Amino acid sequence: MPNIKVFSGSSHPDLAQKICDRLGINHANVVAQKFANGETNVEIGESVRGEDVYIVQSGCGEVNDNLMELLIMINACKIASAERVTAVIPVYPYSRQDKKDKSRAPISAKLVANMLSVAGADHIITMDLHASQIQGFFDIPVDNLYAEPAVVKWIKENIPEWKTAIVVSPDAGGAKRVTSIADRLNIDFALIHKERKKANEVASMVLVGDAKGKVAILIDDMADTCGTIVQAAQKLVEDGATKIYAILTHGIFSGEAIARINNSSFEAVVVTNTIPQDKNMMDCSKIQVIDVSMMFAEAVRRTHNGESVSYLFENVPY
């Protein structure tokens, strides 16, 4: 069996290091730098011939630079005769552009899928895709891991009143995710119906369900400008919720997000470390982080050894 090599892109070296620590290996040598004109240059610092290569690169920060760096790294490994190249992409870039919601709109998520395949990726590992149909944009295997087991564990350990709480989806799209968590915890759920006038701006909200006198747990797959979840929290307060938590897989937090959270009524805003959160945690005391590096490490280990990954859909590896 070929040896395993884990390379880290420059988007999230901390997560790559945690994955390597969990696997008990050193991460492989790679130097990514930019030329004076802004072009990306990647130097793979050790032989990958016949090896099983994993490249960890999240679609966050400078999204386009990081995506290009990932494509170049995949290609560099592929033409250096790597046996198999797996892209570990905790946050899939452009995942929200997954359909033609109006005429002449691009389906960029499909374009990214094509780019990854053409660069030479043989396998993709990602987490909580914005729409799980994105797996079908690829002709190569895609493992879409769920943060759900880690979220359920966090709720049980950190929210003392969880048995009488209610899980709330801030939009209809996340209803499936929320009902699944409500079933696992055996508690009620509600959802908020919102009407948008234009992208990133929410017009009006209606709560479907009863939150009066309960702890409300808002759950979504990503929070970008946080307009939706802050407005949802406001709505829940108006409807009589006692405490409000938000649990989000990908905390992008761009624009005014941190200021909005600081001024909001949340007890805590919990995100996973698919995106580096150190700076955000310093700017906002409400942000807490669930470590999901062990899920990626276990997915890498199982893929490498040819084992089933489906255990991770229900359980958190210890």
Image: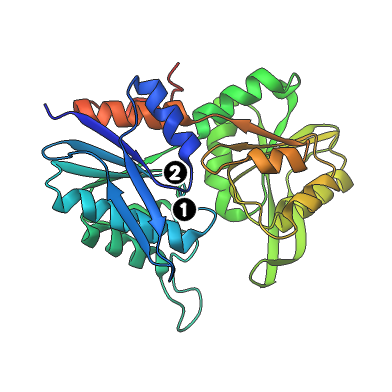
- How many other residues sit within 10 Å of disc 2, few (<14), some (14-19) or many (≥20)? many
Which x, y percent locates residue 243? Answer: 82, 33
Which x, y percent locates residue 182? Answer: 60, 32
Pick whichever of labels 2 and 1 is earlier in the sequence: 1
The residue located at (33%, 52%) in the rendering is 135
Q: How is the image coloured?
A: rainbow
The residue located at (67%, 50%) in the rendering is 170
Tell me the amino acid under the disc marked 1: Gly
Q: Is residue 313 visible?
A: no
Query: Can you say which quadrant of the picture contains the N terminus?
Result: top left
Q: Judge by depth and name the residue closer to the eye, 169 or 270.
A: 270
Quarter of the view holding residue 278: top right
Mark 2 lies on residue: 90
Which x, y percent locates residue 43? Answer: 29, 50
Q: Judge by depth and name the residue closer to the eye, 79 or 203.
A: 79
Quick check: 244 above or below 173? above
Q: Are marks 2 and 1 in contact (CB under 8 Å)?
A: yes
Quick check: 201 above or below 48? below
Q: Give SS at disc 2.
A: loop
Which x, y percent locates residue 11? Answer: 48, 48
Q: CA distance from mark 2 to mark 1?
A: 7 Å
- Mark number, residue 59: 1
- How many other residues sit within 10 Å of disc 1, few (<14), some (14-19) or many (≥20)? many
